[in-house]
Amino acid sequence: MARTLHFSIFRHNPYDPQSVPRMQSYTLDETPRATLFTTLNRIREEQDPSLQFDFVCRAAICGSCAMLVNGRPLLACKTRTEELPETITMHPLPFFRLVGDLSVDTGSWFGEMEQRVESWVHQQHSFDPNGLEERMSNDKALEIYELERCIECGCCLAACGVALMRPDFLGAAGMLRVARYLADPRDHRSEAQVLEVLAPDSAVSGCVGFLACDDFCPKNLPLEEQWAFARRWLLAHGALSDNRPTPQRIG
Amino acid sequence: MTTIVTDVLVIGGGLAGERTAIEAASRGLRCIILSLVPPKRSHSSAAQGGMQAAMGNMAESQGDSPDVHFEDTVKGADWGNEQDVARKFVTLAPIAIRQMSYWGVPWNRVVAGPRTLPDGRVIEEAKEKEGLIAARNFGGTKKWRACYCSDGTGHSLLYAMDNVAVELGIEVHDRVEAVALIHGGERCFGAVVRDLRTGELRSYIAPATVIATGGYGRIYGLSTNAVINEGTGMIIAQDTGVVPLGNMEAVQFHPTGVVPGDILVTEGCRGDGGYLLDKNEHRFMVDYEPAKKELASRDVVSRRMVYHMRQGYGIDTPYGPHLWLDIRHLGKEHIETNLRDVAEICRDFLGVDPVHQLIPVRPTQHYSMGGVRTDSEGRAYGLKGLYAAGEASCWDLHGFNRLGGNSLAETIVMGMVVGETVAKDRAGTDFTFQERCAIDTQKQVEERIRKLLRGGGKEYVFDLRNRVSDILMEKVAVFRNGKDLEKAVEELQEVYERAQNLGLRSNGLGPNPEMASALRMPGMVRVALTIAYGALQRTESRGSHYREDYAHRDDVNWLKRTLATWQPGAKLPTLNYEPVKITELPPGERGYGEAQGQAPQAQAAQKEAIHG
Ligand SMILES: Cc1cc2nc3c(=O)[nH]c(=O)nc-3n(C[C@H](O)[C@H](O)[C@H](O)COP(=O)(O)OP(=O)(O)OC[C@H]3O[C@@H](n4cnc5c(N)ncnc54)[C@H](O)[C@@H]3O)c2cc1C
Ligand code: FES
């Protein structure tokens, strides 16, 4: 039997002077194999063409569609209605600036993070178009790839208690970016630069180890492991004192 | 009126746009990139398979070279492409791959030693190649040539590219849409841009404007493309009335997009022995193609699938009919290892377990070969100071069929070329800009917005969009014939009339999505008409353009490219044609073994082409 789904969706258009933040209800019959991508588009086309949300790839690749569904940050395109109860509440991701309704501005935050961590390979020589590529073991290539699978969806920040209290927090996404370059033999950034980025309270020292980032990462990135790696790196470089334990999963 | 001035305005933040900007910036020009979304969310990130370049590092790519790559590309194109472009492309592709490695892409690498292929053959990777960039096999190529990063080639490429743009301090304005080009009939001066956060308009003035806006797949509702690929770059080019779009009727389809969602599942499923079943769970390909069955070429399989569904053998759903892909008999182990990506897509997006259940699939639009026509250095025809790159362009590498893996390589190689052209053209020239043009263009856009805000007409944008999609999918897709194409043109003209009468149901303020769609709609119908009308006029079959009533390639009459402009106020595009440039390889057999031979008169044409 097809279910009837009841949606309660956060609405607000900051560019409409009449708009006040509110929850709006929609009712829809469930279709087979529907995801929140197909469903939200049906609501927009059939009931409310003003409803804002962001999808680009609709295949869990581009990171556009993170939102809170029944309180949990997730990728809407990868969420099937079948997995959800009949009553579904949707909010925009916290932490990021609201564009409208379910749409938030993750792009600006990630752009600034990239400047902050200097998210590019720090090469020592220039490119030689006539030379062969530098050799690398396939295992190394796979290790780097594993660390750059982040799609910048923002779920880790939306789930993070520290980030919600301090907007300058580097977050799991920023920490992972640094780890990606530390793993890359082509990168020659200075230790001082890494220390400056990772050591402060707004970065690794500020993480209290709830690891909600790891729980909610839709790409299952090895965030718990990489926080521990970052702490060990800082310890080894004398930037953390030993009396703070490596974060352990709390609760 | 807010006006922003820069040296180079790049419309599009996918691989093509970012590579163009990087090249121009490293030659000392100030660039601004515009994008509908943060650049790393562009469609380029979704390419998973690989990027073609003749590196020749694998056992199965021994003997590969730019020459072999050239030949594969021209055959793939069914001789509809520019051979000088193809030559330049195959020469630069290996450099592009190595430069991306230098910029941080973790290409998979060669592991020396023996290994067993899925077909049981044992090959030996050479010791001296250990650690060089690896490649995998892709359809339509003689050698293994597709360089890749696990299952995320496009993702890794786009992130590395964006990192370089960040390093160079290239300015990116995201969540904006170029809605009109500013020009004076002979020269392009930039674009009027709508901020999708606020709804405000701005004018960007630049001596060089580059269209790198990707494909138009989404005009065909059912498409493997990202949902933002609505052809807006081609629309604004065509809107000028002087810039032609090339070969818009050349559209590639993929046999297996899942339903709903249209996410592509790889051809590997059929390659490894998957079946296609109809509503009675009958394996129908055996009836149509007794020899090759599911392994017939992409085009043939798509056509048979559509035909079979039209005979009433599809499975009906709220999303329209589909067929089944059955890989259950390949067994759990094979599916979980060799077809892991497919298994994940099925579980995550459909809730289907392909080890025990059937996968709902149908042919889906996949790639746009046509685009803004440029010369072999990326200058658009019709307007000075306008350029194009990537899937939005038609310098014409792909002709009537793109080879898998050639498009990622094209975005990067063409970005290199166009960035250089822009810098070359800029050197030593003065730029005088007619302010009147910017003011007038912005006023015209403002007027369109005002009209919609005032209430406008009665037509609902999503109704029209669905109508366009239905017409194209039904009559301008894998099967084409004169009667249906005529009907499609007629029906699209009706939709075009209705699109002049759009009205909003919501208030249209700020980032309102209905307003953004309504502004795009008339242009989308024009592009749809350009595809349909071009297909109607082209009375032959070439590559992905298959006419039931003209089943052969016709090199006597059709070894030429369609150029479509749209005159102001016209109801149809104006079509002109130019010859295809054949510099090395005269037309011949593609060797794909499909039942699509040449007409006898084509042989005469071949002789001519060799001598002419
Ligand atoms: C599912 C899938 C898999 C694929 N796999 C492969 C593969 O394995 N190998 C391969 O070679 N090719 C593959 N392709 C094709 C390839 O991905 C694309 O051809 C290529 O990425 C296009 O890149 P681009 O830079 O031209 O455009 P895109 O990446 O589409 O970027 C377009 C950019 O333009 C911007 N834009 C658009 N309109 C406007 C506007 N009006 N104003 C401002 N900005 C605008 C967008 O925001 C975006 O930034 C695949 C395609 C699909 C659909
Ligand atoms: S739309 Fe791309 S991740 Fe969901």
Image (tube, coloured by chain):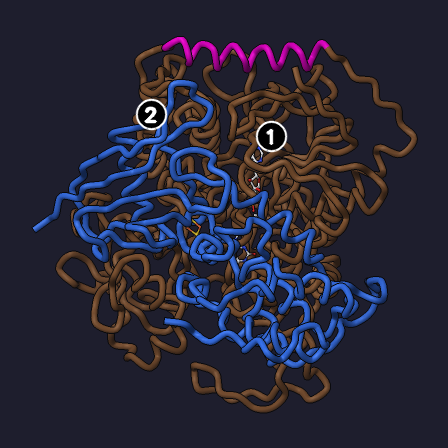
Chain colours: A blue, B brown
Task: Report x, y in % for residue A113.
Answer: 63, 52
Q: Which mark is residue B577?
A: 1
Mark 2 CB within 8 Å of ligand 1: no
Q: Residue at x 38, y 30 (%)?
A: A12
Q: What is the crowding at mark 1: few (fewer than 14 residues within 10 Å), some, or many (at least 20)?
A: some
The span picked out in magenta is: B436-455
Nearer to us in this view, B588 or B355? B355
Outermost residue toward the left?
A: A1
Q: Chain of mark 1?
A: B
Tell me if mark 2 has few (under 14), some (14-19) or many (20+) residues whose alpha carbon lies within 10 angstroms of its own: many
User: Farthest residue in the right direction?
Assistant: B428
Q: Earlier in the sequence, mark 2 or mark 1?
A: 2
Task: Tell me, yes or no, whether the highlighted magenta stretch contains residue B440.
Answer: yes
> In the image, which disc is placed on residue B464?
2
Disc 1: residue Cβ within 8 A of ligand 1's nearest atom: no
At x 79% / y 37%, what residue is drawn?
A: B30
Viewer-proximal residue among A135 and B400:
A135
